[in-house]
């Protein structure tokens, strides 16, 4: 395992237990340090917005309660992370921050090898936008943990031969997270020989790192992202 530390990006909301437990279990299994960060983003929590006449006082009071509750929840979530790390004998350092979520997590993430964050089952536009930005611009591999209990025993790698896919493939191989999981290597292309050639290149790379993968090639449909999710 080449990774040494993970960033647990904890939101200042309830139901972060799954993210906390997964981050700590990953750190415990692979001897990683944990850096916890919970950001209270006032621009998202209490944005400036047009109001009808007479509503400013109500918004001011409402925003005070929202910010207070978020700060209290952030402290509770970070405390839970720190306590679980202490119980599992995992090194942890954590911080509470206020500011732009993406900027803060991007800066803190530079000190770590990967980011672990959660996603709600019914994420609103703000959460979905933040998650998309973190995945695209975070600068580190990111594990998005869904709600509910799960166990990782099978991995799907979607590989199209691009530089970006190659970096993702390398990050996965270097992480050591493959373990004894079943690995499916998926390439989507209407040219079957082209798909086989692309997938074989990735399979050989993984093989050199002691990872066995089964190639799976399928023809492309209109929405490839949806197609990957369906196969997953």
Image: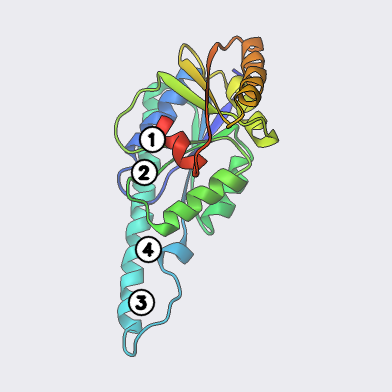
Q: How far apart in space, not on screen, are marks 4 and 3 (Cα)? A: 11 Å
Q: Are marks 3 and 1 in contact (CB under 8 Å)?
A: no
Q: How far apart in space, not on screen, are marks 3 and 1 (Cα)? A: 32 Å
Look at mark 1 in the image and give the residue it sits on: 20
Residue 144 makes an appearance in the image: no
Report x, y in % for residue 59. 34, 77
Tell which circle, 3 or 1, labels the residue nearer the N-terminal end. 1
Look at mark 2 in the image and give the residue it sits on: 77
Where disc 1 sits, the SS reads: helix
Tell which circle, 4 or 3, labels the residue nearer the N-terminal end. 3
Q: Quadrant of the C terminus?
A: top left
Mark 4 surroundings within 10 Å by alpha-carbon count, few (fewer than 14), some (14 through 19), many (20 or more): some
Residue 15 makes an appearance in the image: yes
Residue occupying the far right of the picture = 163
Report x, y in % for residue 69. 32, 59
At x 40%, y 22%, the residue is 152
Where disc 2 sits, the SS reads: helix
In this rendering, the answer to whether 205 lies above or below 167 is: above
Report x, y in % for residue 119. 39, 44
Q: How far apart in space, not on screen, are marks 2 and 1 (Cα)? A: 8 Å
Q: Are marks 2 and 1 in contact (CB under 8 Å)?
A: yes
Report x, y in % for residue 188. 55, 31
Where disc 4 sits, the SS reads: helix
Q: How far apart in space, not on screen, are marks 2 and 4 (Cα)? A: 15 Å
Q: Count the numbered circles shown.
A: 4
Q: Nearer the viewer, residue 223 or 203?
A: 223
Look at mark 4 in the image and give the residue it sits on: 67
Q: Are marks 2 and 3 in contact (CB under 8 Å)?
A: no
């Amino acid at each position: 395992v080449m990774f040494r530390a993970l960033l647990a990006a904890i939101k200042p909301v309830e139901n972060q237990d799954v993210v906390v437990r997964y981050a700590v279990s990953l750190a415990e299994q692979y001897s990683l340090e944990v850096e916890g960060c919970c950001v209270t983003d006032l621009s998202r929590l209490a944005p400036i917005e047009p109001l009808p006449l007479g509503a400013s006082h109500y918004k001011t009071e409402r925003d005070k309660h929202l910010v207070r509750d978020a700060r209290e929840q952030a402290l509770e979530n970070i405390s839970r992370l720190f306590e679980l790390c202490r119980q599992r004998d995992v090194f942890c350092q954590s911080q509470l921050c206020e500011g732009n979520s993406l900027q803060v997590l991007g800066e803190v993430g530079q000190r770590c090898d990967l980011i672990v964050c959660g996603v709600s089952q019914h994420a609103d536009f703000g959460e979905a936008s933040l998650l998309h930005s973190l995945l695209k611009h975070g600068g580190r591999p990111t594990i998005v943990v869904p709600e509910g209990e799960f166990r990782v025993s099978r991995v799907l790698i979607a590989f199209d031969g691009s530089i970006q896919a190659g970096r993702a493939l390398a990050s996965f191989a270097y992480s050591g997270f493959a373990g004894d999981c079943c690995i499916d290597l998926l390439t989507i292309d209407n040219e079957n020989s082209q798909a086989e050639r692309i997938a074989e290149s990735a399979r050989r790379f993984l093989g050199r790192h002691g990872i066995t993968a089964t190639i799976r090639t399928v023809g492309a449909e209109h929405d490839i992202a949806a197609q990957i999710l369906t196969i997953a």
